[in-house]
């Protein structure tokens, strides 16, 4: 697939078909994430894939609450990728502190998008979630207390054969050359 075509097809899916995701496809998504660049090659991530039909509803419930219900669609997701922020190497950590930029979060974002783009190539949909009950997810997945859950991604088959029209700023409003 041509990259721009793939990017146009990638969207946040909020309704999934009740069909188990093939682990071979998940592994190719993980391989795409593994190949992503990171500051000082620190690779500050670990992916926990949740595809157990008894566990996925519990993870879904940890992504919304009575007050914050916009993630209720996760109940239809047959799989989740939970990204843990792992220890980064010393040079990446020092560079991030010196510049005041959390490079490890940028790195995780790049890896997550690589994962999601490969999912599109595999005929799968995804949605990145920043809102979730970290304590509950850590408990369910037996993630050590010292670790940080950075992102949760829904993953599954869907019926959206025609992606929604993307509403984006025009190129002239986001671009300049040689000066602000």
Image (spheres, rainbow, N blue to C red):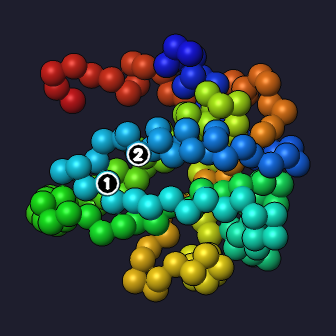
**108 shown above or below 37:** below
Against 96, is 112 above or below? above
Which residue is located at x 67 percent, y 47 percent? 23
Query: Mark 2 near mark 1, Cβ–Cβ under 8 Å?
Result: yes
Query: Residue 63: in sight, yes or no?
Result: yes
Q: Is residue 74 left or right of residue 119?
A: right
Nearest to the observer: residue 98 or residue 17: 17
Q: CA distance from mark 2 to mark 1?
A: 8 Å
Q: Position of residue 18 (x, y in %)?
A: 88, 48
Furthest residue to the top? 2
Q: Quadrant of the N terminus?
A: top right
Mark 1 packing: few (<14 Cα in 10 Å), some, or many (20+)? many
Q: Quadrant of the C terminus?
A: top left
Residue 113: x and y in percent read 49, 41
Q: Which type of secondary structure does the marked residue at label 2 adopt?
A: helix
The residue that label 1 is drawn on is 43
Residue 94: quarter of image: bottom left
79 sits left or right of 172 in the view: right
Asked if 171 appears above or below 26 in the picture, the reply is above
The secondary element bearing badge 1 is classed as loop
For image coordinates 27% across by 22% down, the residue present is 176
Pointer 2: what residue?
A: 34
First of labels 2, 1 by sequence position? 2
Q: Position of residue 104 (x, y in %)?
A: 31, 58
């Amino acid at each position: 697939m041509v990259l721009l075509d793939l990017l146009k097809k990638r969207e946040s899916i909020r309704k999934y078909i009740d069909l188990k995701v093939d682990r071979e496809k998940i592994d190719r998504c993980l391989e795409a994430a593994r190949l992503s660049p990171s500051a000082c090659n620190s690779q500050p991530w670990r992916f926990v894939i949740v595809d157990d039909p008894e566990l996925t509803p519990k993870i879904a419930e940890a992504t919304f609450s009575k007050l914050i219900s916009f993630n209720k669609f996760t109940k239809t997701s047959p799989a989740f990728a939970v990204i843990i922020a792992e220890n980064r190497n010393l040079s990446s950590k020092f560079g991030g502190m010196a510049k005041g930029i959390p490079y490890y979060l940028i790195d995780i974002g790049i890896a997550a998008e690589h994962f999601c783009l490969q999912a599109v190539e595999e005929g799968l949909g995804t949605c990145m979630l920043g809102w979730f009950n970290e304590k509950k997810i850590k408990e369910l997945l037996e993630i050590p207390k010292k670790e940080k859950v950075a992102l949760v991604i829904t993953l599954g088959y869907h019926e959206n054969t025609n992606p929604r029209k993307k509403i984006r700023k025009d190129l002239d409003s986001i671009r300049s050359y040689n000066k602000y």
